[in-house]
Image (cartoon, rainbow, N blue to C red):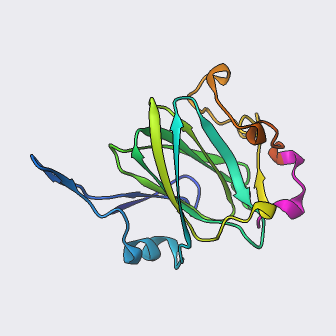
């Protein structure tokens, strides 16, 4: 498995080796020893899956302490633009983001550690998205950042008028409007 460091320290891409022939293919989608060698020890406690149509943007989400989550995300079918935003107080990369294309074809996974907000935009007709979490979903600690915060400047590769968002995601605050105590680190 190839491990790629992104522009944000701690946010990693895992690219599996795929073995294929005329019958199909095989690849290891997760190996604990490889993951822990690069991302550190984690215990994944919850797996989630979502299905979305083209133009859906989900995020930017995070959980407040003491329930901050790390996520290992992948796309089983379709293509998404996956985004992580550094929201760690005092971080030299605070407010910066990385955006990576994940697809059923490239089979890449992205590790988003605690201390980062996460979101994705569906670029294909549909997408089946799967992810592991290292903390349980805790609704009372659920938080988010406005998807189109101009200070973060994410190019979602979806025209704003074509974006499909939940009512919750439309109402999220901008990063600078969030009290420091609400940020996870």
Horizontal and vertical percent for residue 134?
Answer: 59, 71
Q: Is residue 99 magenta?
A: no
Visible residue check, residue 89: no
Residue drawn where x is 34% and y is 46% of the image: 106
Residue drawn where x is 55% and y is 59% of the image: 11
Quarter of the rendering occupied by the C terminus = bottom right
| 163 to 45, vertically: above or below | above
Horizontal and vertical percent for residue 162?
Answer: 62, 22
Quarter of the rendering occupied by the N terminus = bottom left
Q: Quarter-wise, where is residue 173 in the image?
A: top right
Residue interval drawn in magenta:
176-185
Residue farthest left in this picture:
22
Q: Does the magenta stretch include residue 183?
A: yes
Horizontal and vertical percent for residue 180?
Answer: 88, 60
Horizontal and vertical percent for residue 142?
Answer: 76, 58
- In the image, 148: left or right of 82? right
Visible residue check, residue 48: yes
- In the image, 82: left or right of 62? left
């Amino acid at each position: 498995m190839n491990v790629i460091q992104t522009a944000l320290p701690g946010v990693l891409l895992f690219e599996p080796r795929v073995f294929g022939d005329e019958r199909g293919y095989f690849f290891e989608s997760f190996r604990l020893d490889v993951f822990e060698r690069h991302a550190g020890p984690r215990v994944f406690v919850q797996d989630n899956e979502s299905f979305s149509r083209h133009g859906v943007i989900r995020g930017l989400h995070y959980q407040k302490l003491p329930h901050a989550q790390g996520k290992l995300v992948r796309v089983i079918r379709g293509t998404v633009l996956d985004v992580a935003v550094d929201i760690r107080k005092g971080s030299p990369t605070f407010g910066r983001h990385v955006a990576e294309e994940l697809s059923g074809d490239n089979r890449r996974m992205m590790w988003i550690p605690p201390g980062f907000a996460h979101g994705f935009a569906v670029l294909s007709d549909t997408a089946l998205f799967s992810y592991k979490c290292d903390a349980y979903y805790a609704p009372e600690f659920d938080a988010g950042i406005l998807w189109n915060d101009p200070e973060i400047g994410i190019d979602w590769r979806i025209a704003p008028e074509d974006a499909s968002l939940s009512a919750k995601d439309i109402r999220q605050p901008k990063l600078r409007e969030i009290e420091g105590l609400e940020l996870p680190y």
